[in-house]
Image (spheres, rainbow, N blue to C red):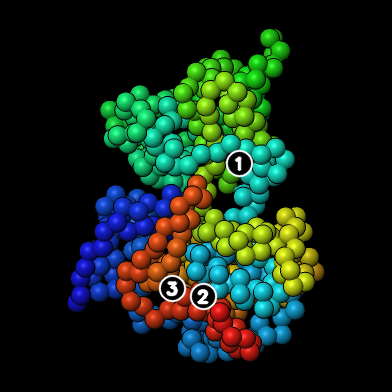
Amino acid sequence: MATATLTDVACPFCGLGCDDLTLDVSGETLAASGGACVRAKLAFQKIASTPADAPHSWVEGKPVSLDQAMARVMDLIAPSKAPLFGGLATDVLGMRGLMELADRTGALLDHMNSEAKLRNLRSVQDAGWITTTLSEVRNRADVIVCFGTDVSARFPRFFERCVWVEEPMFLKDSEHRQVIIIGQPKDLAGATSPKGRVPEVISLSPDRLAEAAALMRGLVAGSLPPQIQTDLPLEALKSVAERLKQAHYGVIVWAAADLDWSHADLTVQALTGMVGTLNITTRCSGLPLGGSDGDFSSDAVMLWQTGYPFRTSLASGTGHYDPVMHSTQRVLHEDEADLLLWVAGLDPDRTQVPNTQSASGKHCPMIALTSAGAPLIQEAMVQITVATPAVDTHGYFFRADKIVSLPLRKAIQRSYPTVAEFAHRVMAGLGEKAC
């Protein structure tokens, strides 16, 4: 059995895109080490441990050959007049293939994470923002406020990779950095400094975070009445505001996926407005963390090819962006799609599908592309296992700050088609030459 050790491997299973992993390859099995987080270890192991002779194509839940599955795919796609391409959890190369197919079929495109992304986008559209990169945080930030997000849960190595570093370029050391967490973190281990200094925690339930963001914006701007009445921890929040004012380089960190309430974009706007005010007298930036499930990678391809982000339809032959009307769940609920192509080709545990039943009770037919190790999706008329970038195919992945595109190296040999190969095969079946 062939064995090998791959070093400096990039990981696509969260938006950090850590590129210092080690993969021990033995035949078709993988073991991730070299600093790999629990999330990465489980994902690599789960995908690679699927037996090569296990079924990897299904029609209505029954194992079939890939050719038989593709024949059924063509039966569904060829007559479709209003296809919806959802999920879109893939890398740059996979998304480029899907864009070709969407252009040919007039599909609507929407990512599984688009609702969270729009909370940030609405804030940018309304007032703009000042944001930073992971490298800037690593080398410059002296006060870091994590707002409403359990950063270690979503991005396990954030503090290791970006905060508690050995030699920040523009600071004497990282030990004296102030880390403040506003919310309800479950685990403080990652946010605790190497010498044991625990972060300051201001415990607030999710239903009070919007109010806290607005209050902090007022505290930073000095625009609150002197006798304000609130049951929030006012003195603690005042202290945070003062430390941000005195910081040489403050950073406010959040993940829009955790700000899950009505009009949460206004909370993002309060945070970014606070950043803007702070920059009048000092330096401060926002760090909106995302990039998981390939959302930044897929969005980048859409932007450079159409000029529009997720929730764009190509039905008219050109891009039509509508962040409200083109929601996956709304389109399915209103029976406006006659086919759903659901792409979940990265994390095998991220295969939750939308409700395909419309208000009238009709179910939209579904084709699902999933990674090895993913469960069988009962709603899918066809399900095909596709190659996963960084495991059994190469690719490219944009990390959380959208600055760096990381190469993903193929580690093991499998016979699964890539997402792009699937798209090109469908294109050929429709009588189009793949680009």
Residue at numbered disc 2: 420
Residue drawn at x 57%, y 58% is 300
Q: Say what amino acid the circle numbered 1 marks.
A: Leu
352 left or right of 214?
left
Nearest the viewer among 433 and 379 is 433
Mark 3–mark 1 Cα distance, whole angstroms, equals 32 Å
Across and down, in percent, residue 167 comes to 30, 34
Instruction: In the rendered view, tell whether residue 171 sits above or below residue 52.
Output: above
Q: CA distance from mark 1 to mark 2?
A: 33 Å
Circle 3 sits on which residue? 387
- Is there CB contact under 8 Å for labels 3 and 2? no
User: What element does badge 2 sit on?
Assistant: helix
Which residue is rendered at x = 67% and y = 78% of the image? 104
Q: Is residue 153 above or below residue 72?
A: above
Q: Earlier in the sequence, mark 3 or mark 1?
A: 1
Q: Amino acid at mark 2?
A: Ala
Q: Residues within 10 Å of mark 1 (few under 14, many from 20)?
A: many
Indicate the secondary structure of the residue bearing disc 1.
Answer: loop
Q: Amino acid at mark 3?
A: Ala
Q: What residue is drawn where x is 62% and y is 59%?
A: 303
The one nearer the camera, 339 or 248, is: 248
**Picture quadrant of residue 199:** top left
Task: Please indicate, yes or no, whether residue 67 appears anywhere in the rendered image.
Answer: yes
- The residue that label 1 is drawn on is 259
Q: Position of residue 336 (x, y in %)?
A: 77, 69
CA–CA distance in space, label 3 to label 2: 10 Å
- Whichever of callouts 1 and 2 sits on the residue coming sooner in the sequence is 1
